[in-house]
């Protein structure tokens, strides 16, 4: 190697090292910034006189009898959702202030804040899912109510005739403002009981939390001690602004996970309710037996699941405030004087884990959104989870699953590699034709086609088996992107989070190197320009993989190494490993 060559390689090495450290510094800065965003996120305030800056969030005003002042039709679902449309009564204009504090509930899986106004869940954090490995004591925040952020779960009773026998937003009372269900407690569940009474109608709203479940039960017990029947339906809704989840940022080449609503319908088991669609037209479907409605973000979900034997109206819409509603209403029940009735539903707030979602309702587990090839992704994840049950390490499980899939697809790969081996044996003849007719592209093409016909070779025959494998690739891709089980799951050594990018970029570099070696085994492209483009591909993929989850890059590296070994032995068997 002469001196100019040495200088060139030294300069390229220096540029590569500088680029490496610059990217690493930028990634570190972004991670620190995200961590600061989480640290600065306040818990739902427990002060008593917080005003609401959003008309979707009820104000602190109430009437003298304790009923909340409505802030307009933004507070509760329209009565037309439970019965034929009727005119709502005028808003009560009383302005007496009610002081209240949020009720805080702690369980091993949840940290929940409940607003006595309406009994809404206005805050939810997940202690089992910290925001990052660097901040293990800061739990991920899902539900939140503060300035500039609305993500709350509301529920209540709604009267179709709008007789206002009960206020739409009652202020409940509770014996305590702090509840806790400890891991060591003998009880498996905890009940938080809220009470309200007006004109002989006593309402008890009960939240039932469980030690080992992210689903909690919401129950209304209505005792009618008046002289007239009381008729109402139950509603549950999720109110959400359109802003991204706190601290979640996608990389340059990392596709964003779906964020928005979803519902199940008789026609479609899993239907997305996107912000864009709701801005143009609200969604409503009536007479659905069972079902659920949910709001999704990457890895996490909140969902209302009413009793599956009933019939419901499901709806989603954009409000005048700019927030979005995703909710349901039940059929009305009439409570005769001297009798009582129970209204109930389940609310889930937690990770998108199939083993938690499957028992709650049919098709709720489809909110683990694997995209178009979900029918392949679901069994793939089942196999991955089975491997992990005895391998105990998600990274090792990914490697083993990749090997299993590649082994199953071995016959297709064999066809492709045999075709490539035949093409590689023709490399010397292809080069001679290129040298002879390189200036005449038409003649070059004719001579190449004549060679292929003579040798019974087809340069495209190796592509079709590869295309057949693409659905498997995309299905596994979404399994590794969407599965919350891989979030903060360690592999070994420097990789402690398979759901995040490789902090030292070692896997992306290995992936680029393995792609480069794979190309060396393939027959050269006929067009010199195509050859140069293909030489750039490993570098491009190396850069792309920097921003991809380490678990996905681990799959690519394993796949490349397996394919490279298979390809090499296919070439060796065909006598094409050392073309002349």
Image: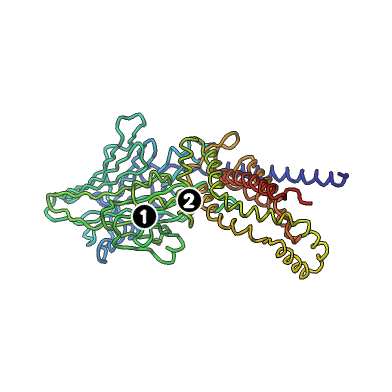
At which x and y percent is residue 403?
Answer: 56, 43
Which dot, 1 or 2, sits closer to the camera?
Answer: 2
Of residues 343 and 364, the one nearer the viewer is 364
Q: Position of residue 222 (x, y in %)?
A: 20, 49
The residue pinned by badge 1 equals 293
- Placement of 322 over or under 521, stated as above or below: below
Question: How far is mark 1 from mark 2, CA to CA?
Answer: 23 Å
Horizontal placement of 93 versus 127: left or right?
left
**Mark carried by residue 156:** none
Vertical side of 344 occupied by 443: above or below:
below
Query: Nearest the camera: 55 or 30?
Result: 30
Residue 324: image x %, image y %? 41, 58
| Disc marking residue 377 | 2
Image quadrant holding the N terminus, namely top right
Q: Look at the numbered disc 1 and give the secondary structure of its residue.
A: strand
Point 76% across, 51% down: residue:
579
Q: Secondary structure at mark 2?
A: helix
Q: Residue furthest bottom?
A: 442
Coordinates of residue 378 in the picture (x, y in percent): 45, 50
562 or 302: nearer the eye?
Answer: 562
Q: Is residue 542 visible?
A: no
């Amino acid at each position: 190697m002469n001196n100019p060559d040495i200088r060139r390689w030294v300069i390229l090495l220096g540029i590569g090292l500088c680029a490496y450290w610059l990217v690493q510094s930028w990634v570190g800065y972004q991670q620190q910034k995200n961590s600061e965003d989480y640290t600065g996120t306040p818990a739902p305030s427990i002060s008593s006189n917080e005003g609401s800056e959003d008309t979707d969030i009820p104000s602190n005003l109430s009437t003298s009898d304790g009923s909340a002042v409505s802030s307009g039709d933004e507070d509760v679902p329209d009565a037309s959702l439970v019965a034929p449309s009727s005119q709502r009564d005028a808003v009560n204009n009383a302005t007496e202030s009610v002081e209240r504090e949020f009720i805080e509930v702690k369980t091993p899986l949840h940290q929940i804040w409940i607003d006595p106004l309406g009994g809404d869940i206005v805050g939810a954090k997940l202690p089992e899912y910290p925001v990052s490995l660097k901040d293990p004591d800061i739990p991920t925040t899902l539900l939140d109510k503060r300035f500039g952020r609305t993500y709350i779960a509301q529920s209540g009773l709604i009267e179709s005739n709008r007789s206002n026998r009960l206020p739409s937003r009652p202020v409940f009372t509770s014996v305590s403002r702090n509840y806790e269900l400890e891991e060591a407690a003998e009880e498996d569940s905890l009940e938080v009981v809220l009470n309200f009474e007006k004109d002989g109608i006593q309402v008890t709203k009960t939240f039932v939390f469980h030690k080992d479940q992210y689903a909690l039960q919401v129950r209304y017990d209505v005792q009618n001690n008046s002289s007239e029947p009381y008729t109402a339906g139950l509603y549950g809704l999720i109110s959400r602004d359109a802003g991204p989840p706190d601290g979640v940022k996608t990389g340059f080449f990392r596709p964003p996970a779906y964020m928005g609503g979803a519902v199940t319908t008789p026609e479609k088991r899993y239907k997305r309710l996107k912000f864009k669609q709701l801005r143009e037209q609200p969604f409503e479907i009536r007479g659905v037996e069972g079902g659920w409605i949910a709001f999704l973000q990457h890895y996490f979900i909140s969902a209302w699941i009413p009793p599956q034997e009933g019939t419901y109206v499901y709806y989603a819409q954009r409000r005048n405030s700019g927030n979005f509603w995703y909710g349901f209403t039940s059929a009305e029940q009439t409570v005769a004087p001297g009798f009582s009735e129970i209204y109930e539903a389940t609310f889930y707030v937690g990770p998108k884990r199939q083993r938690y979602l499957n028992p709650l309702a049919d098709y709720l587990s489809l909110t683990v959104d694997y995209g178009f090839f979900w029918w392949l992704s679901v069994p793939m994840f089942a196999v991955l989870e089975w491997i992990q049950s005895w391998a105990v390490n998600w990274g090792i499980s990914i490697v083993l699953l990749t090997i299993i899939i590649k082994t199953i697809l071995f016959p297709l790969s064999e066809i492709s590699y045999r075709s490539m081996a035949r093409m590689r044996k023709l490399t010397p003849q292809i080069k001679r034709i290129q040298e002879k007719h390189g200036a005449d592209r038409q003649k070059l093409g004719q001579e190449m086609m004549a060679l292929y016909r003579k040798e019974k070779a087809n340069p495209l025959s190796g592509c079709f088996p590869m295309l057949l494998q693409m659905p498997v690739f995309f299905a596994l891709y979404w399994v590794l992107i969407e599965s919350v089980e891989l979030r903060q799951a360690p592999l070994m050594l420097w990789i402690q989070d398979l759901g995040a990018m490789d902090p030292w970029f070692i896997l992306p570099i290995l992936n680029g190197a393995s792609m480069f070696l794979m190309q060396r085994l393939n027959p050269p492209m006929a067009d010199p320009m195509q050859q140069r483009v293909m030489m750039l591909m490993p570098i491009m993929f190396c850069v792309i993989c920097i921003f991809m989850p380490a678990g996905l890059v681990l799959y690519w590296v394993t796949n490349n190494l397996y394919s490279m070994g298979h390809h090499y032995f296919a070439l060796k068997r065909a006598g094409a490993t050392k073309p002349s």
